[in-house]
Amino acid sequence: MIGIIGAMQEEVDLLLAALQDFVEVERSGMRYYTGSLHGKNVTVGKCGVGKVNAAVYTQVMIDRFSVNKVLFTGVAGALDPELEIGDIVISTSCQQHDMDVTPLGYPKGVIPYQEVSDWPADPELVRIASEAGETAAPGRCRKGKVLSGDQFIADREVVKQLRETFGGACTEMEGAAVAQTCAMNQVPYVVIRSMSDKANGSASVNFAEFTVEASNRSYAIVHEMLKRI
Ligand code: ADE
C-alpha cells in the first residue's frame, strides 16, 4: 500500500479526482481515502498544515492502512537562488529548521539525544521520482535537501540564514515530520515539492497565485511515479 499525502486541499485535489473505487475513513479527525490510482493500491489524503498534523497523519497511515511507502506531494518556497517558481525539488533528506536547542550547545536543527536529525529519503524512491520528473517536467527537477518548520518564510534575510545554516534547496512545513515518522517505522519516503514562491517579500502574493499550478506539477510527477513503482 502506497501512502500519498499533501498538506492542503489544492495539493490533493487531482489525486482525489483520479482515485477509483475508494473508501473514506475518518481517524483522529482527519480523512483518509483508500482506493486505486493508476492501478496501484493507495491511501491518499490531506494532512493539514504543519509538523504535528503531518506526523500524526503519517503514523495513522502506517498503523491503520498498512502503508509501506510514503510519497509527499505539494508546494514549497525556494531557498536555492537557481530555483524558479514551478521548478521541482525531490528530497534527498529532510530536516526541521526550527528545532533550536542552541542554548544547551546543540547545533541548530539538531534534536537532542537522537542520532539523526536530517532524515535521508529512500534512494530508490528518489531515483523513481527523478526519472518521473524528467518525463513530467523535463529540465525542471533537481534533488536537494528539504527544510521544514512551523513557519511560512517570507523574508530574504531568513532565506540567507537557512541557506547558510542548513544548505537547503527549499522550505515547507511538513516534510521533516513525515520523514521522521517514516524513519521511526522503517518506512521509505520521498518528498516532491514544486516551488510556489521564493520565500522572500513576494512569497505570500506568489503563493496565492502559483499554488494550484505548482501543486498540479507535483501531482504530475507522483502520477508518473505510480507507473514505475
Ligand atoms: N510552502 C510554500 N511556500 C512556503 C514558504 N515560503 N514557507 C513555508 N512553507 C511554504
Image: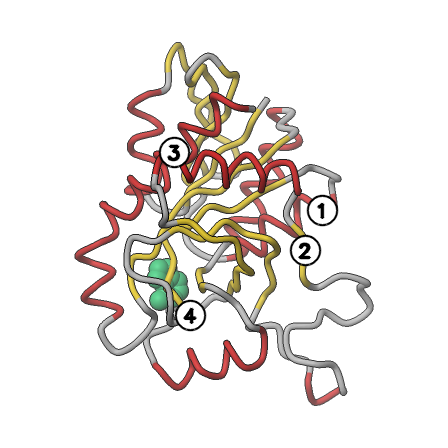
Number of numbered discs present? 4
Q: Quadrant of the C terminus?
A: top right
Which residue occupies 68% across, 55% down? Answer: 119
Q: Is residue 155 left or right of residue 90?
A: left
Earlier sequence position, callout 1 versus callout 4: 4
- Tell me which colouring the rendered structure shows: secondary structure
| Residue 204 x, y percent position in the rendering | 24, 68
Which residue occupies 56% across, 60% down? Answer: 145
Helix, strand or loop at label 1? It is helix
Earlier sequence position, callout 2 versus callout 4: 4
- The quarter of the image that holds ligand 1 is bottom left
Q: Residue furthest bottom?
A: 103
* Residue type, numbered disc 4: Leu
- Above or below, comparing residue 68 to residue 55 in the picture: above
Are the residues tagged 2 and 4 within 8 Å (C-beta)?
no
- Above or below, comparing residue 176 to residue 28 in the picture: below
For marks 3 and 4, give the CA distance: 24 Å
* Residue type, numbered disc 2: Trp
Give the class, few, some or many, for how many residues have Cα within 10 Å of label 4's Cα (few <14, many ≥20). many
Q: Quadrant of the N terminus?
A: top right
Q: Nearer the viewer, mark 1 or mark 2?
A: 2
Query: Disc 1 designates what residue?
Result: 183
Query: Disc 2 designates what residue?
Result: 119
* Residue type, numbered disc 1: Ala
Are the residues tagged 1 and 2 within 8 Å (C-beta)?
yes
For marks 2 and 3, give the CA distance: 27 Å
Which residue occupies 45% across, 37% down? Answer: 30
Query: Disc 3 designates what residue?
Result: 135
Q: Nearer the viewer, mark 3 or mark 4?
A: 3
For marks 1 and 3, give the CA distance: 29 Å
Earlier sequence position, callout 1 versus callout 2: 2
Query: Disc 4 designates what residue?
Result: 79
